[in-house]
Amino acid sequence: MTTSMRNSSGLSSTRPVISAAEAKEVLQAAEAKAAEIGIPVVIVVVDDAGDLKAMLRMDGTPKVAIQWAIDKAITAASFRAPTHALAQAMEGAPSSAIASVMAQPHATLAPAGYPLVIDGMVTGAIGASGGTPEQDQVVAQAGAAALGGA
């Protein structure tokens, strides 16, 4: 799926955006991985602007995991990078740089947020929460891999 937008010169261009069918594919792949490793999670898929496209809260997942998964997905979409990579990039950074990143709405450095890439372009992002950081990452990676990313 593509959407038209105007660039700074006023010319119209198109860019790929994640479709509902693709978001569902990502969600299903992540859910299958969560079931495989036996951990209930919340899985969130957002578009490239960070707007909700799809969400699943598996039975037994704590309610607080909903916001954490949303924040991970929005951060990955906004910064066009996995959240764990953003955290690594912040290691040793001045506290003012970290504060600047964290001042953004929904920003998190928690692992398990991944951009979703189609044709080399970020079209959305996935976030997972409910397990350990490592389990969340495995689930989110499986979802991202459904589109050829992560």
Image (tube, rainbow, N blue to C red):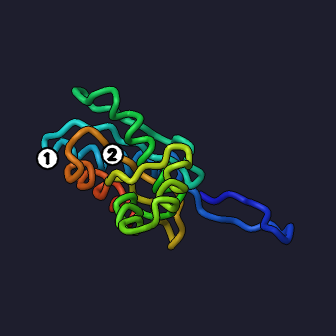
Residue at image position (30%, 42%) is 129
Q: Nearer the viewer, residue 95 or 12?
A: 95
Category of crowding for the residue at label 2, using alpha-carbon neighbours closer than 10 angstroms: few (below 14), some (14–19), many (at least 20): many
Q: Position of residue 87 (x, y in %)?
A: 37, 61
Q: Is 95 located above or below residue 132 in the figure?
A: below
Q: Is 90 located above or below residue 105 in the figure?
A: below
Three-letter amino acid code at disc 2? Ala
The reply, left or right, for residue 61 in relation to residue 8 is left
Residue at the limit of the structure toward the front, as seen here: 95
Q: How many marks?
A: 2
The reply, left or right, for residue 47 in relation to residue 131 is right
Residue at image position (75%, 60%) is 5
Read off the residue under disc 2: 128
Identify the element where label 1 is drawn. Answer: helix
Three-letter amino acid code at disc 1? Ile
Residue at image position (26%, 30%) is 61
Q: Position of residue 2 (x, y in %)?
A: 63, 59
Residue at image position (33%, 62%) is 145
Q: Nearer the viewer, residue 107 or 20?
A: 107
The reply, left or right, for residue 21 in relation to residue 61 is right
Cα separation between marks 1 and 2: 14 Å
Q: Nearer the viewer, mark 1 or mark 2?
A: 2
Q: Is residue 148 visible?
A: no
Identify the element where label 2 is drawn. Answer: strand
Q: Nearer the viewer, residue 8 or 23?
A: 8
Q: Position of residue 123 (x, y in %)?
A: 53, 59
Nearer-N-terminus badge (1/2)? 1
Read off the residue under disc 1: 37
